[in-house]
Amino acid sequence: MSSATMRASTLVIARRSMVRFFRTPQLVVLGTVQGAIFLLVYRYVFGGAIDAGGIPYVDFLVPGFIATMVLFVGVGVAAGVAEDMREGFVDRLRSLPIPRSAVLSGRALADVAQLVWGLGVTTALGFVVGFRFHGSAGAALAAFALCVAYGVAFEWMFVALGTLASNAQAAQGIGFLVFPLTFVSSAYVPVDSMPGWLQAFANHQPITVMVDAVRSLALGPQAGPLLAHDSGYYVARALLWTAGIIVVFAPLAVARFRRG
């Protein structure tokens, strides 16, 4: 089929997903409030007990928390894909004269829009609770763009998990298995505070790499006591992880979708 048909089909499916999202108040509230609640808990409950290496904990926390927001959104992606497949929506689309890849690309486009919404709300709340950028405006935009890129990568992983699950509840449960990665990372505490055997894992998993990249851009010179390299080093590593996750999980998601 033509590229015009592919674009049109993708946009129609994306619009359907967005309309469904905004017509379900529970999803809108959950997508907006869930991250905010966790950020407030970390900021005001744990903030006074954690040494962030000489910088205010709020400045340490917010970049890491925003980077890990992609996982909050991703769990919803997995549940949504599983629900669409279980309720027969995907089967109805397969019977139409549209490219099959448009089904996944449309879903992905809608989920990216929801991710941008969630990141924007959480970033605004970060400023409310005391966070401030110490890098340039360009670095701030680059940090936000990196978070969106991470979201696209992890979205494919959660889509693949959604195609494996038998229903939305199972998909949500499977998705939450990814969350321990956020705690065994540099997102909420310095890796140096962990036991030595755990530091080896924390320093070489994707969440830490991505968080360090966002933190280096957001904090600018203030990141010096925390990070041994410049932002270019961390951004390059984060982009490699992002590309690797897409290369592994996008084909898996497509293959599972075609068999499903």
Image: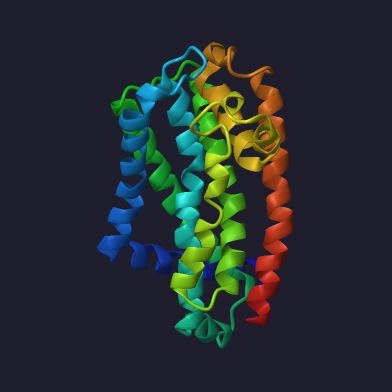
Q: Residue at x 60, y 73 (%)?
A: 164
* Residue 187 visible from this viewpoint: yes
Q: In which quarter of the image is the C terminus?
A: bottom right
Q: Which residue is drawn at 68% across and 24% down?
A: 232
Query: In the image as oriented, which residue stretches furthest toward the left?
Result: 25
Q: Where is residue 20 in the image (x, y as percent from the top left)?
A: 35, 68
Which is nearer the eye, 199 or 22? Answer: 199
Q: Taking 224 as reference, is 107 left or right?
A: left
Q: Where is residue 88 in the image (x, y as percent from the top left)?
A: 48, 85
Q: Taking 80 as reference, is 178 left or right?
A: right
Q: How many labels does the image show?
A: 0
* Residue 103 visible from this viewpoint: no
| In this view, 208 is above or below 133 | below
Q: Taking 144 as reference, is 258 left or right?
A: right
Which is nearer the eye, 72 or 98? Answer: 72
| In this view, 77 is above or below 67 | below
Q: In which quarter of the image is the N terminus?
A: bottom right
Q: Which residue is drawn at 69% across and 39% down?
A: 201
Query: In the image as oriented, which residue stretches furthest toward the bottom?
Result: 95
